[in-house]
Image (cartoon, helix red, strand yellow):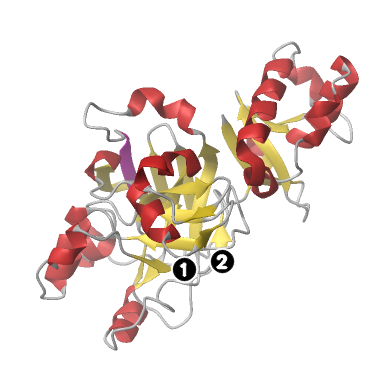
Amino acid sequence: MKFVTYTLDGGAQPRFGFKKDEYIIDVIRAAIWANEKNGDSSFLEIPSTLKKALKNWDTNFAKLKKLDTALREINIQYHTDGDKPIAVLEEDVQLLAPVPNPQSFRDFYAFEQHVRAARKLRGVDMHPDWFKIAIFYFSNPAALYGHGEDIPYPRGTNELDYELEFAIIIAKGGSDINQDEADKYIAGYTICNDWSARDLQREEMAMSLGPAKGKDFASSFGPYMVTPDELEDAWDDDGKLQLRMTCHVNGKLISDGNTNDLYHPFTKMIERASMNAQLLPGDILGSGTVGTGCILELRPENVGGWIKKGDVVHMEVERLGVLENKIV
């Protein structure tokens, strides 16, 4: 399934939904309908937000799949009218980040090609410990944007960059999670754009701390949280997810990579992140930038410069959807 958080008609109250064909199904309204139609009060136990549902994800996901099955008995288009429609055309909603208010967002550094290129630009060799440790930094969970939302150009930078990534959203939560058990904590996958102000990042990291202000102004996620069962046929014989990742700027293809280049798997990231620490439901772990996945790596003089006001950055990851934002 593909889960979303969205608003409708400019409403401030985020709503919990899932994608069904060209529609977004409102989970709570659909649950009320299913209870009235089937006399099954278990539908009413589904939480009102995705973040809340993730706390007891195995049970809630089963109820959500049951709700999806119940909706197959009706013609969705006849439930799109009135003050409280069950379904709304996806083009008529504003998608937010799938979990717009996580407790934390950890971004890793797990694609070897990007790491090698970035370190070469700084004049340093690969650190041997990178191959042993899945390293990350904490970004700002209060500055998340969804598909179609405008991104304010950050003050103090002349070198705005995108970073093409994908991410997982944590189910259940836990601490000291063993890598062999970690896949049970993956609720789903989403696209991530880790916006970066390279001049600010370079300035602060020269003092051996960060990134901080070079990153914390915005991160984009979406359009959906895609559950692992949707991707069962996308794994290769080596146990790697095979999904093409691309980024266009103003319609021009700039970045082209694949998820299978990930050196450290998400299960290893979960083990590292949860060591001596509590991962919470809804927490986000980013992959880091795929090879060729940013202007820094490709060099601005080769791709038309840094990101400017008015630019539209269009990311697509096969099977996960499209994440597009305009800089304003």
Q: Quadrant of the N terminus?
A: top right
> Secondary structure under badge 2?
loop
Residue sitting at x 68%, y 46%: 6
Q: Which residue is mark 1?
A: 139
**Residue 303 is at least partly visible in this image:** yes
Disc number for residue 66: none
In the image, residue 244 lies in the stretch drawn in magenta: yes
> Secondary structure under badge 1?
loop
Picture coordinates of residue 122, whole percent (x, y): 16, 75
Q: Main secondary structure of the magenta part?
A: strand
Residue sitting at x 25%, y 44%: 257
Picture coordinates of residue 322, whole percent (x, y): 46, 41
Picture coordinates of residue 83, whole percent (x, y): 89, 36
Residue type marked 1: Ser
User: Marks 2 and 1: in contact by CB < 8 Å?
Assistant: yes
Crowding at mark 2 (Cα within 10 Å: few <14, some 14-19, many 20+): few
First to last magenta residue range: 243-247
In the image, residue 140 lies in the stretch drawn in magenta: no
Measured in 3D between alpha carbons, the distance from the residue under mark 1 to the one under mark 2, in whole angstroms, is 9 Å
In-image side of 147 versus 194 (left or right): right
Looking at the rendered image, the disc whose residue lies closer to the viewer, 1 or 2, is: 1
Q: Which residue is mark 2?
A: 143
Residue type marked 2: Ala
Residue lying at the far bottom of the rendered structure: 207
Crowding at mark 1 (Cα within 10 Å: few <14, some 14-19, many 20+): many
